[in-house]
Image (cartoon, rainbow, N blue to C red):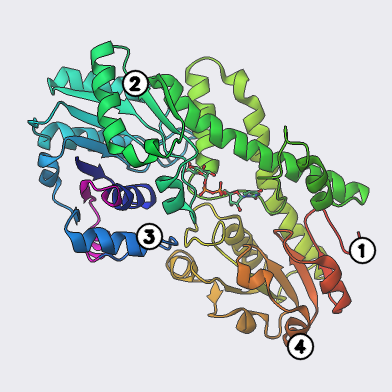
Amino acid sequence: MRISVIGCGYLGAVHAACMADFGHEVVGVDVDPEKVAKLAAGVPSFHEPGLEPLLRKGVDSGDLTFTTDKAAIAEARVHFIAVGTPQRGGSYAADLSYVWTAVDDILTHARPQSDGPLVIVGKSTVPVGTAQAIADRVAEAGLDAVVVWNPEFLREGFAVQDTLTPDRVVYGLPEDGVASGVARTALDEVYAPILEAGIPRLLVNYPTAELVKVAANSFLATKISFINSMAELCDAAGADVSRLAEAIGHDDRIGPKFLQAGIGFGGGCLPKDIRAFMARAGELGVDQSLTFLREVDSINMRRRDHAVELASTMAGGRLVGVKVAVLGLTFKPDSDDVRDSPALDIAGRLWGRGANVVATDPAGAHAVRALRPDLQIVDSADEALDGAELVMLLTAWKEYVAIDPSHAKSLVAMPRVIDGRNVLDPQRWTDAGWDYRGMGRRAGQ
Ligand code: UGA
């Protein structure tokens, strides 16, 4: 199958590489020449484990190309829309301008193909109702193409694995039976290796497909905020949220995943998706259905306040001039993404309160240097720890989880640590002479 992928960010670049791996002929199109130059040379433009070999393989074989020339989509039969839908400035709603530009690009450059009707596949996360609006626009423009909505569930850090072997694939199909059949057959061909592996395929209508995506992310965000609200209770009552999560997670109706309490969720998806979902519910006249998401969001933001206050308390009530070593700046490990990162937000707030912040991150330093040139970034944990009066672990990179507390103690000025992700062993750190504070847990429990 000849495929175009419009938008080569996290989603599009990984999708393009994986589709080439499935044996398709893929062209990725993006407006950013720097990004395209890297991808075209087989080099990822962001940190994503396992992506580089796949990109190289596709590029070397000639089956995977990247370009800024939108006209290059002309030979494709299936067009994937994989552009970003960020939060609109001054509002909770999603900014769909990149999606509409992609649709216009398809209307301008797509050409009829001899091997079957054109298929436009939406992968971006959009407010419910968008797929139908796109289908209407395509019909009005007179392009003979079928629109299908096919949400993506990949996690950063596991993007390749999640694309090659997803938990499920969802096709949001048009009501018209003939069009629906065309879309289903084309996507079945695109995803043949996934379907042959027996991965469930769900056939639904447009609005269901759009809602599946935001419902899944809302559920995940709710689970995290639930456990973080339990962390607040645990702090107040002297309990340990990690043990609590372990105990409730044994109930398989609850499950152990996404119950890691800490400084909360961030990234380019969960925070903006729950906000856009609330905004869309308001437009649909059912805002009450999602008022709980407002609470999910505010519990999440409170975690950051709590981390800053805890730092201040541990430093004796004042942060001015206190040397704070911040370990981790990305929104999660195995990613260089600092979008809406709780760690970066907390580092910035400590700096704003006068702390002498010295931060480090294995992959996010480059992005942070561009965004926050005022923050002091060093290359290693040892450099950050040198002379620190307070240590804050804010992203659970495995190299930070593995730090030896005795070695770390030999470097710092004051052995005080805030474990913002509840990933250190409290007993081990306390035994090594540290004043340890977790998020809803403490040493000795
Ligand atoms: C999320 C979803 O997990 C994916 O299924 C979805 O496809 C993706 O958004 C998307 O919409 O594109 P991602 O943003 O890569 O994926 O990251 P997650 O692994 O969900 O983590 C999000 C945040 O929650 C991180 O800041 C992480 O540190 C935090 N988190 C996660 C917790 O604080 N506790 C947990 O137990 C789990």
From the viewer's perspective, is residue 263 above or below residue 152?
Answer: below
Q: State the CA–CA distance, disc 1 to disc 4.
A: 23 Å
- Type of amino acid at the residue the image marks with label 2: Leu
The range drawn in magenta is 20-41
Answer yes or no: is residue 356 visible: yes
Residue in the image at 23% along x and 50% along y: 28
Point out the tag, 3 or 1, that comes first from the N-terminus: 3
- Can you tell which quarter of the image residue 84 is in? top left
Give the structural element (helix, strand or loop) at label 3: helix
* 315 falls in the magenta region: no
Q: State the CA–CA distance, disc 4 to disc 3.
A: 38 Å
Point out the tag, 1 or 2, that comes first from the N-terminus: 2
Which residue in the protein does label 4 denote? 410
- Can you tell which quarter of the image residue 74 is in? top left
Give the structural element (helix, strand or loop) at label 1: loop
- Type of amino acid at the residue the image marks with label 3: Leu
Asked if disc 1 is less than 8 Å from ligand 1, the answer is: no
